[in-house]
Image: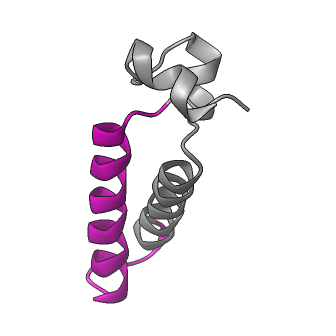
Amino acid sequence: MKKNLGTTDRLVRIIVSALLFSYYFLEVPEGIVKWVILVLAGILGITALVGTCPLYSLFGLSSLKKNNINRIL
């Protein structure tokens, strides 16, 4: 898959993922909300590490700058 996440987008996803994981492990939420938070944190973390967002690809979006696309590929 083509990379479609820019540096800022990836950084924000990693930070949000870390916050959600910490919220999950603090055991604040209960029930289904706890599992939704875990899945969301996992998805954000994986997409940030891989550099590709399937939803961005589906809608033809990209947060990469034009000059960074050639450098990453």
- Where, quadrant-wise, is the C terminus in this rendering? top right
- Which quadrant of the figure contains the N terminus? top right
Q: Is residue 3 shown above or below 58?
A: below
Relative height, residue 26 to residue 5 (above, below)? below
Q: Would residue 14 be found to the left or right of residue 73 on screen?
A: left
x%, y% of residue 39?
A: 54, 62
Residue 11: x, y in percent? 30, 51
Q: How many marks?
A: 0
Give how far across and how far down residue 26 sits, in percent.
28, 89
Q: Main secondary structure of the magenta part?
A: helix
Residue 57 lies in quadrant: top right
Question: Is residue 29 in view from this perspective?
Answer: no
Q: Which residues are magenta?
A: 5-32
Q: Is residue 32 above or below residue 45?
A: below
Would residue 44 be found to the left or right of residue 27 on screen?
Answer: right
Q: Residue at x 45, y 75 (%)?
A: 31
- Identify whether 17 is placed above or below 10: below
- Tell me: 28 left or right of 60: left
- Determine if the magenta segment contains residue 22: yes
Q: Is residue 31 magenta?
A: yes
